[in-house]
């Protein structure tokens, strides 16, 4: 699944890198992009891969995920992958993201950007520090050891998606996915992934860190 909003440049690189037979279908969940995101996605997707386009309810990445859950027959596949459409993540690493699911070692897989030192070149200092602090907060509150709470690269079993209850509307989605996995006893695995500078204008702002932190607090204590 690819949540998109005005990613006309990055989406081309993502589509070109998606491999079949690792991926048989792409669902693009669009937040009513005002640029050529959808056109470019259609033009660059490989002919061997099916693609469907879904327009999300409301605004924000969390709402895109909620729309996907609401409008998808989750029995269609055993595993699902979500990544950002700005080409910060490499779709060719999907194979290793789904490996723990196929092995039965995990129900949820989180990509770890901090495994590689290159992340400092792709992420601003304030983003790097903010991500590390939010990850630390998640560890302290939930007594688990996530490596990268705010990662945009995830893989899920269909059982997890059938049972997850997402309340997040925006960039607190990843925190909500983590809290749901922990509270409901799903097995979480971490896989190192590469991370590159995004293509296009950034949407995540510094103040979103407070929204993410509040999601962690609310799901833990309220």
Image: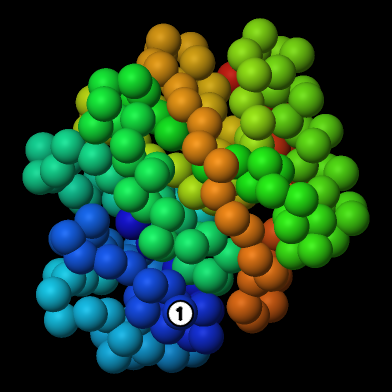
Horizontal side, residue 22 vs residue 125: left or right: left
Q: Between 45 and 141, which is closer to the camera in this rendering?
A: 45
Q: Is residue 115 above or below residue 59?
A: above
Please state, as top left, top right, bottom left or bottom right, where the N terminus lies in the image. bottom left
The residue lying furthest to the left in this view is: 76
Give neighbour class at mark 1: few <14, some 14-19, many 20+ (Cα, 10 Å). Answer: many
Whether residue 58 is visible: no
Q: Is residue 186 above or below residue 49?
A: above
Q: Is residue 5 above or below residue 12?
A: above
**Number of numbered callouts drawn:** 1
* Image position, residue 202 (x, y; %): 70, 70
Please state, as top left, top right, bottom left or bottom right, where the C terminus lies in the image. top right
* Image position, residue 154 (x, y; %): 45, 43
For the point 35% across and 30% down, which residue is it? Answer: 100
Please tell me in which quadrant of the rendered image residue 121 appears: bottom right
For the point 76% across and 33% down, which residue is it? Answer: 134
List the residue tagged with mark 1: 13
Secondary structure of residue under mark 1: helix
* Image position, residue 178 (x, y; %): 53, 28
How is this picture coloured?
rainbow
Whether residue 90 is visible: yes
Q: Is residue 220 above or below residue 89?
A: above
Q: Between 62 and 113, which is closer to the camera in this rendering?
A: 113
Q: Between 157 and 162, which is closer to the camera in this rendering?
A: 157
Horizontal side, residue 124 vs residue 169: left or right: right
Please tell me in which quadrant of the rendered image residue 16 appears: bottom left
For the point 27% across and 21% down, which residue is it? Answer: 104
* Image position, residue 194 (x, y; %): 59, 55
For the point 87% across and 44% down, which residue is it? Answer: 129
């Amino acid at each position: 699944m690819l949540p998109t909003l005005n990613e006309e440049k990055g989406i081309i690189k993502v589509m070109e890198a998606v491999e079949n037979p690792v991926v048989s279908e792409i669902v693009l969940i669009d937040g009513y992009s005002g640029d050529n995101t959808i056109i470019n996605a259609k033009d660059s997707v490989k002919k061997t891969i099916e693609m469907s386009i879904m327009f999300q309810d409301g605004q924000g990445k969390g709402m895109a995920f909620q729309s996907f859950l609401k409008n998808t027959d989750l029995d269609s596949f055993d595993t699902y992958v979500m990544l950002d459409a700005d080409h910060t993540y490499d779709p060719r690493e999907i194979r290793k993201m789904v490996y723990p699911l196929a092995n039965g070692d995990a129900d949820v897989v989180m990509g770890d950007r901090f495994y590689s030192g290159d992340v400092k070149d792709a992420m601003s200092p304030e983003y790097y520090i903010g991500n590390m602090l939010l990850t630390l907060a998640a560890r302290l509150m939930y007594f688990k050891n996530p490596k990268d709470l705010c990662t945009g690269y995830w893989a899920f079993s269909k059982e997890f998606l059938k049972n997850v209850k997402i309340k997040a509307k925006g960039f607190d989605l990843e925190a909500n996915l983590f809290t749901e996995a922990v509270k409901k006893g799903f097995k979480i695995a971490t896989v190192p992934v590469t991370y590159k500078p995004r293509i296009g204008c950034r949407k995540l702002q510094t103040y979103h860190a407070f929204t993410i932190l509040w999601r962690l607090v609310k799901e833990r204590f309220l």
